[in-house]
Image: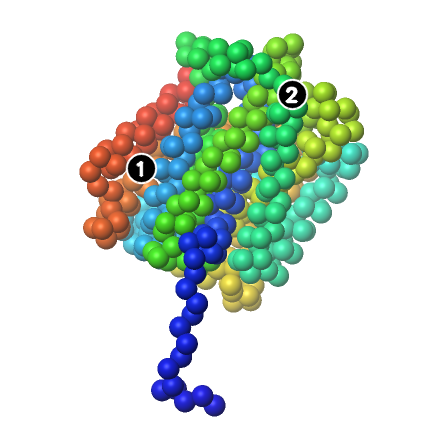
Amino acid sequence: MRDSLTPQPSPPRLSRWQHFLLVLGPGLIVMLADTDAGSIITAAQSGAQWGYRLLLPQLLLVPILYVVQELTVRLGLVTGKGHGELIRDTFGLPWALLSVSTLVVACVGALLTEFSGLAGVGLLFGVPTWLTMLLVAGGLILMVWTGSYRSVERVAMGIGLFELVFVVVAWFSHPNLGVMVTGMLQPALQDTHYLYLLAANIGAVIMPWMVFYQQSAVIDKGLDARDLTPARWDTLIGSIVTQVIMAAVLIVTAATLGTTNPNAALDTVQDIAASLTPFLGEFNGRILFALGMSGAALVAAIVVALTAAWGVGEVFGFKHSLEHHPQEAPWFYGIFFFCVTLAGVIVASNVNLVALSVGVQVMNALLLPIVLGFLYCLALQALPPEHRLQGKYKNITLTLIVITSAFGVYGALAGL
């Protein structure tokens, strides 16, 4: 046995690139989950009904999304606490209960849209909804109950990258760049239907569960304040990727239905698949759409269900880590099981996917003042002085949060 006084060799020093690869994951995954089934449907509706007029907001939301999620990363890495736990310790249990209640509502709504999207993909190939739900719910439960955080992260990242299929489809749609630029600069801010879809797009990009997930994920992965810089790069790359995917879906429908049949009804996943892929051939188009939609919905389902379990666990103080065995953290795994099973049962009852998905995104927009308000206040009070928001960046962050929240709520109420 080696003498405890014998000097131990220092671990090899990591290069910046190696450090980044070690940290990479939570930011990219939460952003891929952000472009979920409901977001894709919202983007498709936007392009079909308004052409390229809602494309500019997709680009403008990149820095806003990064600012919001960077605060989340900073809070998690510096304090070592999840979002719900930090609210409880900083502002008290009643405020934490308010915050986690908005989280649960958002998570349930999101899970319904993910499973509805997967059910629609199954119907493209003649698979009945009940069988799709059984396979999806069973697979997710088995993966989480038998895996660690890192194994779940690798699976989620691999699945989510299938969303890049939409970028390929957008390239083959050959959009007219002149028409695209003209449309981007002609918003229809006087039209309540336009404002409603604008609110839905804002709600599709900044979702309550994203804040909870990324803050919990960086902790469960074992990261700390030393990993702040690569974690920020992880978040920035994810912010760009998710909005590129949203823009790609919007461009495809704008280039097809937006120019030929802007009033076409997109009432089912099958309708959206048909509108996105006519120029690729029926078989190839169906396969590519199925890959993209399945990647989007599956990674989001993993993230959303975990977020609900993490958030409730943080507020009430029971064990809430993927590093714990199900017998050690029965409430954590039980909440995950309950959310996944409930969503599967509801979707098997044949809800209207498109109406539900757009409505969920609008609900997210209405919840923004609560979610972003807590996030900003925590960044001012829960962080040590050297990591708090300060100076011009503090004012810029507040301005972006207020404008985004106000515009989301206004657009949602105007369209009701």
- Which residue is disc 1 drawn over? 373
Q: What residue is rendered at 25% in x and 42% in y?
A: 389
Q: Earlier in the sequence, mark 2 or mark 1?
A: 2
Q: Is residue 340 visible?
A: no
Residue at the (36%, 51%) spot, across then down: 228
Total numbered labels placed on residues in the image: 2
Is residue 214 visible to us here? Answer: yes
Instruction: Work out how far the residue at label 2 is from the one at label 1, CA to CA, in angstroms.
Output: 40 Å
Q: Nearer the viewer, residue 396 or 216?
A: 396
Q: Is residue 128 above or below residue 306?
A: above
| Image position of 306 (left or right of 343) | left
Q: Residue at x 69, y 43 (%)?
A: 133
Residue at label 2? Answer: 173
Foreground disc of the pair 2, 1:
2
In the visual, does 91 lie left or right of 200? Answer: left
Give above or below for 14 relative to 340: below
SS of the residue at dot 2? loop
Q: Amino acid at mark 1?
A: Gly
Left or right: where 371 falls relative to 17: left
Tell me where residue 295 appears, x and y as whole percent.
Answer: 63, 40
Residue in view at x 63 percent, y 19 percent: 174
Q: Left or right of 402: which side holds 124?
A: right
Residue 219 coordinates in the image, percent (x, y): 42, 56
- Residue 170: assigned label: none
Task: Report the amino acid beneath label 2.
Answer: Ser
**Which of 330/230 is in front?**
230
